[in-house]
């Protein structure tokens, strides 16, 4: 009997070995499949970066010498996407040119290897792990060289992809229980590791993995992983020329998931068969009359053993027990077959349908989102460039126009004064009317300058709820009765810094638009709230992520369609009748809000209404009131003043105005001439200078030289442009400042040492 049992036990062993081999084979496939999946995820992320960099490389803004524009452009893309830690361009000598990144972030960027490599190879390069530095989180670096119009490589675009984001993507890929995975850069530095460890990023992967990955082939290997546990690892190297990224996914043979369960079930069947057959063979030894049915049983068993569960013993002759045994075994085989089919189907469904489909869908969704983000960024960029071009044009016109107005106003004021002196009331009245018209012209150029973001802003710390209540007191009475207005604020609105007078104009522009959109009446609702924006949400407003105060004006008016929406911020765009609207309202709003560091968004549904949201950056904590403007203290008239302006008309009228007020005036036509006079012996008590002048010496240079050559001299700057920042000067702190076109009395007050009245609409 024992002898008869031996082959049965051998059979059982064979079955188990087979099951295990089959299981390992399926584990092999599974490990490779998962490694491919993770690698595909990496490849897709890298492709996304490459596309973004290629799009950026095609933009002229990147190559321009105007780094401010380039900075802003990159900052917009950064805000739009949310997955980058920084975007920058690097010149050929390895130094960063323009950079978009969180403010307080360090970037030690002394010509990294991968940047040189990208330039040398003239192609996109996955650079590798960049450890966290200061406020900057860890990142994966990418580089793409860009060329000028002649095809010469002139620099490199570098993107730092957030490792946090990359890891978030990988979280979407479920791994079976007991599995482990890691992603490494070209140098074997771990970018992601699962199961997650607290400080796994930046450690080095074992060399045995790197050696296998550098082989460049996809393969499986039984290796001890980073936790020392042995697993069957699927290895997937990435990179066109040499290893740029590597992926390893290891499966635990003891918990290999569905595939293993199927194989184990089959092994169980075989063990059962083996035991049954042991008994059978024992019985067969007793009788030779059962040779034929026994051979049939053996043939069926051998078929089952090799996995053909469809084989059957069929109707047996011989003793009753044999016939019964044959039937029972057939039934068992049929049941096993069904069970295996069910298991396989369930597994396939679970694994293939469940996992792969979900992952495919996730990838599709991701690709779609990336495409939409890229489209939105491109749309915004095109829009911005158009607005920028219009802005430059209007700014130029407005600037010249301002100078003309200055001349007209100055002369009119002098003539009016003379008329009043003669007691000619009629002439004085007519001149007064002319002066008011000049005032309107000045407001118009103000709006134009505001659109081109070159308005002079008197920003100060404000509490918006108080300011709003104050402004609404003036707006509500001018609205018709059939328009209901309400405004709400939430408690503890953050403080912000803005020019209250321009804010009032902006709010008025938006409310008036709402009113015109509701000829039959309706309601206007104004809401105000604190808003914390992440990068994605901030992209909608074209601002960096951060804290903002949002002021929204919503109406129940006619709304607008996409065509109108696309143009609302353009100056002179209006759908109103000729003479009814100038099309400058929203241009002012957009220009003012952006110049204040915020953003505007308009949403509208035709027939249902429109809402316009203005966002203003929260004033950083601990910043108190702005420093007071320096107190000017000029003792009376008969003072000697140097007046500098490149426009002869302006110069002439200033001279007349100041002489009329009792000053001794010396004029200079440009900065160089002014410096000559300041270096001479000629005494001066004050200098009044235009800011923007041709010839290389600006008004700011004159002002600074004046202060250092003649300590104690009074300096007054005048300009229609808010170019102080561009000239590196904080006008609040450094010099007294007058914005063009200014009125005679404002000029005289400032020179006499009195501060100008606070802009209308502000409360201290
Ligand atoms: N709340 C709104 N509802 C419907 N359409 C609006 C609304 N706000 C603006 N628009 C559309 O946008 C256009 C431009 O607005 P914008 O304020 O810049 O100029 P305007 O109102 O036409 O002229 P202006 O403000 O200079 O008198 C309007 O002509 C109108 O078509
Ligand atoms: Mg308007």
Image (spheres, grey):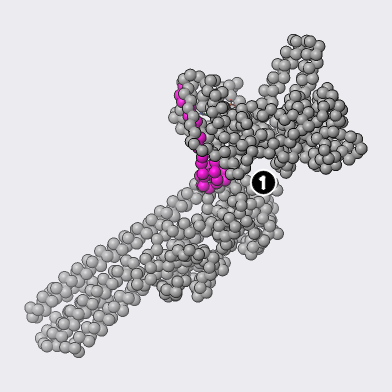
In this view, the residue in front, 412 or 299, is 412
Check the image and report above or below for 570 versus 477. Answer: below
- Asked whether residue 505 is drawn in magenta, I would say no
Residue 329 percent coordinates (x, y): 16, 74
Residue at 77% over, 20% down: 413
Q: Is 425 positioned to the left or the right of 468 in the image? A: right
In this view, the residue in front, 116 or 703, is 703
Q: From where the camera sits, is residue 565 visible?
A: no
Q: Is 396 positioned to the left or the right of 553 in the image? A: right
Ligand 1: give its quadrant: top right
Is label 1's Cβ within 8 Å of ligand 1? no
Q: Over which residues does the magenta segment extend?
A: 521-548
> Which quadrant, please, contains the C terminus?
top right
> Which quadrant, please, contains the N terminus?
bottom left
Q: Secondary structure at mark 1?
A: helix
Residue at 14% over, 73% down: 328
Residue 116 percent coordinates (x, y): 65, 62
Residue at 54% over, 26% down: 472
């Amino acid at each position: 009997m024992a002898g008869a049992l031996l082959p049965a036990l051998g059979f059982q062993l064979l079955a188990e070995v087979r099951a295990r081999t089959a299981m390992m084979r399926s584990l092999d496939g599974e490990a490779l499949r998962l490694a491919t999946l993770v690698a595909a995820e990496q490849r897709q992320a890298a492709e996304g970066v490459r596309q973004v960099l290629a799009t950026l490389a095609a933009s002229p803004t990147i190559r321009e010498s105007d780094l401010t524009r380039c900075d802003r452009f990159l900052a917009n893309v950064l805000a739009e996407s949310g997955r980058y830690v920084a975007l920058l361009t690097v010149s050929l000598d390895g130094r960063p040119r323009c950079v978009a990144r969180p403010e307080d972030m360090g970037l030690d960027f002394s010509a990294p290897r991968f940047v040189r490599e990208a330039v040398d190879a003239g192609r996109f390069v996955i650079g590798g792990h960049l450890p966290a530095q200061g406020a900057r989180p860890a990142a994966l670096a990418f580089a793409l060289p860009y060329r000028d119009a002649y095809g010469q490589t002139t620099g490199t675009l570098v993107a730092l992809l957030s490792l946090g984001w990359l890891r978030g993507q990988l979280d979407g890929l479920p791994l079976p229980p007991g599995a482990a995975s890691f992603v490494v850069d070209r140098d074997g530095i771990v970018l992601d590791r699962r199961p997650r460890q607290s400080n796994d990023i930046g450690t080095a992967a074992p060399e045995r993995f790197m050696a296998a990955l550098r082989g460049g082939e996809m393969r499986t290997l039984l290796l001890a992983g980073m936790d020392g546990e042995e697993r069957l690892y699927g290895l997937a190297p990435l990179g066109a020329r040499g290893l740029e990224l590597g992926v390893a996914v290891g499966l635990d043979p003891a918990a290999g998931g569905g595939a293993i369960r199927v194989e184990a079930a089959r092994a169980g069947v075989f063990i059962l068969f083996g035991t049954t057959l042991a008994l059978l063979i024992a019985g067969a030894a007793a009788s030779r009359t059962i040779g034929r049915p026994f051979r049939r049983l053996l043939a069926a068993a051998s078929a089952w053993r090799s996995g053909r569960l469809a084989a059957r013993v069929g109707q047996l002759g011989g003793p009753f027990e044999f016939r019964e045994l044959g039937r029972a075994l057939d039934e068992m085989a049929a049941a096993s077959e069904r069970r295996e089919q069910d298991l396989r189907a369930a597994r396939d469904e679970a694994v293939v349908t469940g996992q792969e489909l979900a992952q495919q869908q996730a990838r599709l969704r991701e690709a779609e989102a990336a495409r939409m983000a890229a489209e939105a960024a491109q749309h915004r960029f095109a829009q911005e460039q158009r607005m920028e071009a219009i802005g430059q044009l209007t700014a130029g016109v407005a600037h010249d126009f301002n100078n003309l107005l200055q001349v007209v106003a100055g002369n009119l004021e002098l003539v009016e004064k003379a008329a009043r002196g003669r007691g000619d009331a009629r002439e004085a009245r007519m001149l007064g009317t002319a002066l008011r018209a000049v005032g309107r012209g000045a407001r118009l150029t103000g709006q134009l300058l505001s659109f081109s973001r070159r308005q002079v802003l008197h920003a100060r710390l404000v509490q918006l709820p108080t300011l709003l209540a104050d402004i609404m007191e003036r707006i509500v009475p001018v609205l018709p009765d059939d328009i209901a207005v309400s405004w709400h604020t939430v408690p503890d609105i953050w403080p912000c810094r803005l020019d209250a007078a321009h804010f009032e104009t902006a709010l008025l522009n938006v409310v008036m638009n709402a009113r015109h959109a509701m000829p039959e009446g309706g309601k206007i609702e104004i809401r105000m709230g604190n808003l914390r924006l992440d990068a994605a949400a901030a992209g909608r407003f074209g601002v960096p992520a951060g804290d903002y105060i949002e002021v929204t004006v919503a109406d129940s008016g006619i709304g607008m369609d996409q065509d109108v929406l696309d143009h609302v911020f353009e100056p002179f765009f209006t759908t109103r009748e000729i003479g009814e609207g100038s099309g400058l309202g929203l241009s002012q709003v957009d220009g003012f809000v952006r110049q204040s560091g915020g953003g505007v968004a308009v949403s509208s549904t035709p027939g249902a209404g429109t809402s316009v949201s203005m966002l203003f950056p929260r004033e950083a904590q601990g910043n108190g009131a702005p420093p007071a403007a320096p107190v000017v203290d000029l003792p009376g008239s008969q003072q000697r003043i140097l007046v500098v302006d490149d426009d002869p008309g302006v110069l002439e009228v200033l001279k007349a105005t100041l002489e009329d007020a009792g000053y001794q005036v010396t004029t200079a036509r440009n900065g160089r001439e002014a410096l000559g006079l300041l270096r001479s012996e000629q005494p001066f008590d004050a200098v009044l200078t235009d800011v923007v002048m041709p010839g290389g010496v600006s008004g700011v240079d004159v002002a600074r030289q004046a202060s250092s050559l003649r300590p104690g001299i009074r300096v007054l700057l005048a300009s229609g442009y808010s170019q102080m920042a561009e000239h590196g000067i904080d006008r609040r702190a450094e010099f007294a400042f007058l914005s063009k076109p200014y009125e005679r009395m404002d000029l005289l007050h400032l020179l006499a040492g009195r501060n100008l009245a606070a802009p209308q609409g502000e409360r201290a």
